[in-house]
Image (tube, rainbow, N blue to C red):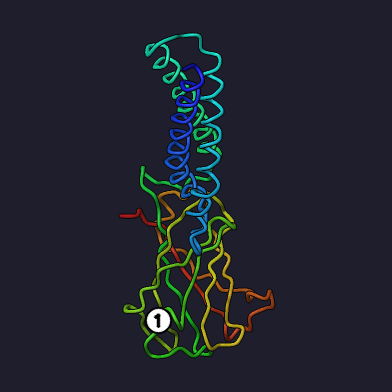
Amino acid sequence: MKTLRVVVIAFLTAIAGAVLSVVASLYLTELYHVSNFEGGRGMLIFFALAPFGLTVGFIIGLIVALRHRGTGFGGFAQAQGIALGIAIGLTALVSGILYLGADHPPKLDGKTLALEFELKIPPALKLPVQQSEQTLHASLYANNRDNSYALLNYDKSATRDGYVFVPGKASLLSQTFNRDLLVSIEGEGGAGQFIKLKLRAKPRKEDEAWSEWIMAAERTDLSPVPDAERIAVRYRVQPEE
């Protein structure tokens, strides 16, 4: 009977550990911008973190069940409660440490922020009359965990003095001053260009005003961009709706 109680407590605590691990991981992997490319985030959670939580839960339940001296159903319930309490407390502790160590999105007046920008593409770079994601795209790069596609509003693109102006938006996901906008034009050999942004890690109210135009200095292969082909951008931060 003692052996059966030990097995049941260890088994139930293992299941609880797996569930707690999945619940915490769903939030934490998103907080740490874990890529979901080809299901990578899901596989990490369900094939690595969930089994880890299962194993830790089993060990907790096993140790508690073996050391607890209570008898009968009351002793079983008490031991199970202690094991579950330890599993929940350990999950909360680890999650809290990881939460504090994460790079949180910057906020202004309690709201998360988006970077609104406008691209200025020179006449030397040929674009089709109707732009699309297949012909023109951009991404906002801060670090290896914060690198996401920007949303370009192709319907609101306009041509003035031979230049093509395309508005766009990208969420600010981390607090860093090291941000680059990568702009690529398909069909234009070597046209991918890096534009170094001059934006605070924690934007202020004054950053809601449009910046000056900033020109690209180098291509994705780190070669310099000829003056006639340099893409420019201006930007501002806005609260996300």
Position in image of residue 73 (x %, y %) = 37, 14
Give percent across and percent down for residue 137.
47, 76
Q: Is residue 3 above or below residue 97?
A: above
Rendering coords of residue 102 (x, y %): 53, 43
Q: Find numbered disc 1 in the image and state the secondary structure of the residue it sits on.
A: loop
Q: Residue furthest right?
A: 223
Query: Callout 1: 10 Å neighbours few (<14), some, many (20+)?
Result: some
Return the residue at label 1. Answer: 132
Residue 193 against residue 239 in the figure, above or below: below
Name the kind of residue labelled 1 in the image.
Ser
Tell whether 31 sits left or right of 160. Answer: right
Instruction: Determine whether 10 is above or below 95 in the image.
Output: above
Quarter of the image for residue 194 reads: bottom right
Residue 145 is drawn in which quadrant?
A: bottom right
For the point 52% across and 37% down, the residue is: 53
- Residue 94, given in percent of the width and then of the height, sits at 53, 33
**Rendered residue at 36%/42% (across/down):** 110
